[in-house]
Structures are given as C-alpha cells and as structure tokens.
C-alpha cells in the first residue's frame, strides 16, 4: 500500500514537471482578471426586456463558460438588464470574446467582396440571379488577399454536405476568391505541408495576375456608399454592431487579433438563416477512415432553414465558383466569420466547415454556432481589468487562519495521541501534497483555478481528514483496553473504523457534489475543492495511515506500549485490577 501511494505521488510530480505546470492557477479574486459589463437591449423597438429572456441569455453564457472547463468564471445578473461576466487570469481575451459575442448569428448571401484598400473597377454585367432568385448581372472574382492560408473554397460531398475551407488559425481571414484557390485535399493525396503551401502560393500569384472587378448590380445605393467608406480598422471593423435582417448590409471580415484590421469587406444580402435555426454544432476530430483529414466543424439546421439553404445552394451552384455570389457568409457580431462557396445543392441540412483548424479553433467556432443565438441584443458597456491586491490580502489572512487551525490540530494530536500523533501529522502532510499536485494538474488539464472559496474548502478538509484519524485511533485504543495485543487490535480496530470513515466521507462528498451542481461562481470552487480533498482523505487513510500503523505495531516502541507511544497500558486503563477485600460471614 505504501509503495503504491509513493508511486502515485512521484508520478504526479513527474507529470507536473513534464507538463510545465508547477503552481496552481489562481481565480479572479487572487490573480486578477477581466470584467465585462453587458447591457441588454430589446431586439424590437418599444419591446420590454423580460426576466425569461434575461435568464435564457445568462444560461447560454454559462454554457459557453462551462464548455471551456472549470475556470471559476462568473456570469451574474445585475439589475433588470445588465449581465456581469468575470473571467480570471491574464490573457483571457479569447474567453472574453466568446462570452461577449452576443449578436445573433446570421447566414447571408455574399453580393460583393473586395480586399480592403484595393478599390476595383466596375465589371461588365453578365446575367446572374440576384440574392432573391431573380435574374440580374453576374459578378467576377475579386482579387485575393495574397495569404495562401486564407483562401476559401468549398465542395459538396455525395451526401450533400458542404465542405468549406474558410477559416484559419487563430483568426479566420476570408479571401475574396470565389474560385477554389486551395483545393481541399482528398484522402488519396499525400502532399507534404511544404508542397501544399507552395501550391497555394502559386495559385495565389496566378489569381493576383487576373484583373477582377465586382458587380454592384442590385446593391442598394446607400449600402454601397457605406461600403465605399469602410476602412475595416479600429471601431470601423463593426464588431458588436447589428443590422436589419431584412436589408442589405456593408460589413468587414473578422479582424486580425494583432493588427485589429480586416483583410476584406463585403456587401451582404438580407438574412436567410438565423442562429435560432442552428440545432446542433460540434467540433469533429480528424478521421482518415471517413476522409476527414483535419479538424472540422459540423452544424445542423432545422426544417425551415434546411429548405431555405437548399434553395440558395441550388441557385448558387448554378452561378459557378468564379462568381462572388456563389458564396454565403456566416455573420456574427457584425463581422463575417467565414464565407465558403458552394459547388452543389445541399439539401440535407447538415454542413461541415473545414479549414486550417486547430482543436481550439474548431471548438471555439462550434461553441459560437451552438450558443450564438441569444434572445436579446447586448452591448459591451465596459471592459476592465481587476486587480488582485485585495484578494491577496484576504489570502494572507486566510492562510494565517488556516495555519493557526492546523497548528492547533497538530498540538492536540501530539498531546492526546503522543506517538500516534506523528502518524496523524504525517498523514496530513501526505494529504496536503496530493491535494497540491491534484490542483496543479487540474489547472493544466481543465483550467481549474484556486479561489479564496476553494482555499476555504481545503482548510475545512483538514478537519475531515483529522476526523478519520480520530475514528481509527479511538477504535484501536478500545481494542487495546479490552486486553488484545497491538497487532490484533490494529486489524480489529481498522475493521470497525473503516465503515464509519467511508460513511462519513461519503456524506461529505455527496454534500460537495450537490453544492457544486446547484451553486455558481466562487461557491462552486469551494464545493469542488471540498469534494476533491474528501476523495484524497479516503486514499490517504487506506493507503498510508492504516499500513503505517500496521508497521509501527511490530516495533517494540508501540508494541510494548511505551509511555510516549500513546498506547501506554496504564494510560488506557489496561492491567489495573480492583482488589476486593474478603468479607466475613457477619458482614455478609
């Protein structure tokens, strides 16, 4: 038992160093973080904001937080129309952006796509259907951005699923090419990454040599004027804006996180599909057997959206890939998230978006598609950083209180149990080490962050662990009082004590589990830590405390009941006999 526990502890330490995580991650109240204030507005003028809509919005945001792991992030309501999102730690822009992405998800047809800063000449009109399906002029292919990794293309499988290469890591950058600039690799191809990149660069250079021009036929003059003014830098990017779904819109692509600039701007047709019509979205891992060679995002549409999407893709496929209006744009937060093209009609209502995804990219996009439809429109009223100074002061006070409590437990164990007290102290040290290792590794793998409430849960666990020792030691001493040898007393006492220990820890764990399930915010951290330390207490008692006492029972110091062992017969009342004076017949 002792060797098994030693191997586990050493393995956890080795895993800590191998993963490069040596200290626990801290929550917002200890490490600081970011606070986002979101103000809700009704989607229709004059409408009121109801409690049910706010509750639904909060639940969606909490789902986004939970999808990222246990991170001590808090989503709370303040007043009647304000939601506060608190995200701990530095460098959490990605999480804040996902939580704060509150605009409705929209699918719109692309009418015009143009590289930012590269105005194009008017094209000679050619017949092509308008976004509503009527005959109009065609559109030539706009010039690509020159970024090989950002070229967009799409195909359709025999089952009618869209396969679109339209997103790149870390931030998708759509190109303006309606033509397949980088053909999606098939399962039979074996191009190396270097060869693939070289091919993309050659195709990009070929397209850059082709003069392209956009067709503004059917574009509202007011929207065209807005389109001409777009610079797609700074506040002009348009993130957080919303547009009338029944009208055309001039928007930018999602900006690069470093430069905060967009490569492309668009004129989009009225909304055809909204986020409420997306029934399912998930990230799919590469699977060579099914022909999926990279991370993919799959989304399903409901019945009405399936028919709308089938009608659009049928008309778009007839335009050909060289036509800009062959593309459909996925719009979120007033920016184009991606704009894949279509080769065949897609009638199944299931689409798969492919690109140069990492696992994180595909997961983020799936979360946005899945939880992107909110019942209200939200504006980011403020974004501010939170200092951890106050939390550190409280942490110092809490650690001092915990140290005092631990010191009192140690003194009690030494005073009352003497030699056995060292067993209790050693068990507490082992439990503390395992808890520290577990918290560090959980911070690495599920982004668990230690908060003040979590530390309180760890301190409470000291009492739970000490209680297990008390139950075992008292059973052991009872067996010794009954005149049994120490070796026999250890086994009999353990047999009687372990059921009590298991029941007590089970009650504590169930309480922590229910508290974690129903609570939010910092209370979740308290419940999580309490449940974790309760499980560790069971491991320590079974794998360390009992085996150690069994070994000590074989020594002379404990086996013969030394006065400092805590098992002294005179102290326990063993060996004392009451002398009864014989009585006379008269007294009888």
Image: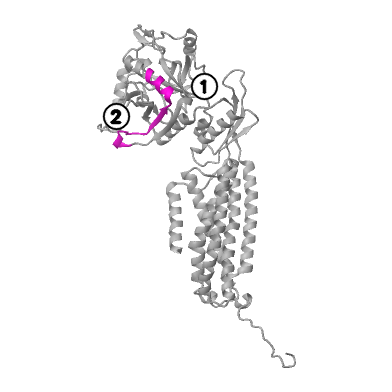
At 56% from the left and 45% from the top, the residue drawn is 516
Q: Is residue 295 magenta?
A: yes
User: In the displayed structure, would residue 452 be above or below residue 546?
Assistant: above
Tell me the colour scheme of the image.
one colour
Q: Position of residue 458 (x, y in %)?
A: 58, 52
At 51% from the left and 66% from the top, the residue drawn is 546
Q: Which comes sooner in the sequence, label 2 or label 1?
A: 2
Q: Position of residue 92 (x, y in %)?
A: 52, 35
Residue denoted by label 2: 185
Judge whether residue 450 can be spotted in this image.
no
CA neighbours of label 1 inside 10 A, class few (<14), some (14 to 19), many (20+): few
Q: Nearer the viewer, mark 2 or mark 1?
A: 2
Picture quarter with the C terminus: bottom right
Q: Which mark is residue 27?
A: none
User: In the displayed structure, would residue 482 be above or below residue 314?
Assistant: below
At 49% from the left and 13% from the top, the residue drawn is 247
Quadrant position of residue 505:
bottom right
Quadrant position of residue 315:
top left
Specify start and end residues of the magenta stretch as a single range.
287-311
Q: Which mark is residue 234?
A: 1
């Amino acid at each position: 038992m002792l060797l098994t526990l030693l191997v586990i502890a050493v393995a956890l330490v080795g895993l800590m160093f191998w993963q490069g995580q040596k200290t626990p991650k801290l929550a917002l109240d200890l490490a600081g973080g970011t606070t986002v204030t979101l103000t809700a507005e009704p989607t229709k003028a004059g409408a009121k904001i109801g409690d049910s809509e706010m509750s639904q919005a909060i639940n969606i945001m909490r789902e986004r937080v939970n999808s990222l792991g246990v991170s001590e992030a808090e989503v709370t309501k303040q007043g009647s129309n304000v939601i506060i999102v608190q995200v701990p730690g530095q460098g959490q822009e990605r999480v804040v952006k996902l939580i704060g992405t509150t605009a409705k998800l929209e699918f719109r047809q692309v009418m015009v796509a143009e590289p930012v800063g590269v105005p194009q000449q008017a094209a000679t009109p050619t017949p092509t259907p308008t976004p509503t399906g009527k005959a109009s002029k065609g559109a030539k292919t706009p010039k690509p951005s020159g970024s090989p990794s950002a070229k967009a293309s799409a195909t359709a499988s025999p089952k009618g699923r869209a396969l679109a290469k339209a997103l790149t890591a870390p931030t998708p950058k759509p190109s303006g090419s309606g033509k397949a600039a980088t053909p999606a690799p098939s399962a039979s191809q074996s191009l190396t990454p270097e060869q693939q990149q070289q091919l993309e660069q050659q195709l990009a250079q070929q397209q850059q040599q082709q003069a392209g021009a956009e067709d503004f036929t059917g574009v509202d003059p007011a929207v065209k004027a807005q389109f001409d003014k777009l610079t797609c830098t700074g506040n002009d990017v348009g993130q957080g804006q919303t547009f009338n779904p029944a009208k055309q819109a001039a928007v930018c692509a999602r900006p690069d996180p470093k430069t905060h600039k967009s490569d492309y701007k668009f004129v989009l047709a009225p909304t055809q599909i909204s986020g409420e019509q997306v029934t399912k979205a998930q990230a799919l891992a590469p699977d060579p057997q099914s022909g999926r060679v990279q991370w993919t995002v799959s989304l399903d549409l409901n019945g009405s959206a399936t028919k709308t999407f089938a009608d659009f893709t049928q008309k778009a496929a007839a335009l050909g890939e060289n036509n800009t209006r062959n593309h459909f744009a996925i719009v979120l937060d007033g920016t184009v998230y991606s704009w894949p093209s279509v080769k065949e009609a897609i009638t199944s209502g299931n689409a798969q978006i492919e690109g140069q995804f990492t696992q994180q990219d595909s997961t983020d996009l799936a979360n946005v598609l899945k939880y992107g439809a909110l019942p209200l429109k939200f504006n980011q009223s403020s974004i501010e950083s939170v200092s951890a100074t106050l939390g550190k002061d409280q942490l110092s006070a809490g650690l001092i209180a915990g140290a005092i409590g631990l010191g009192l437990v140690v003194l009690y164990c030494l005073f009352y149990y003497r030699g056995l007290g060292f067993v209790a102290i050693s068990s507490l040290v082992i439990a503390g080490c395992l808890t520290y290792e577990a918290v560090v590794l959980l911070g690495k793998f599920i982004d668990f962050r230690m908060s003040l409430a979590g530390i309180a849960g760890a301190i409470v666990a000291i009492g739970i662990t000490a209680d297990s020792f008390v139950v075992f030691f008292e059973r052991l001493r009872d067996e010794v009082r009954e005149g049994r040898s120490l070796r026999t007393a250890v086994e009999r006492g353990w047999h009687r004590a372990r059921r009590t220990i298991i029941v007590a820890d089970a009650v504590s764990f169930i309480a922590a589990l229910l508290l974690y399930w129903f609570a939010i915010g910092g209370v979740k951290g308290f419940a999580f830590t309490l449940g974790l330390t309760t499980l560790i207490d069971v491991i320590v008692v079974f794998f360390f405390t009992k085996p150690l006492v069994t070994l000590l029972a074989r020594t002379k110091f404990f086996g013969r009941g030394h006065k400092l062992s805590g098992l002294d017969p005179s102290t326990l009342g063993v060996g004392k006999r009451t002398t009864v004076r014989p009585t006379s017949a008269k007294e009888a």
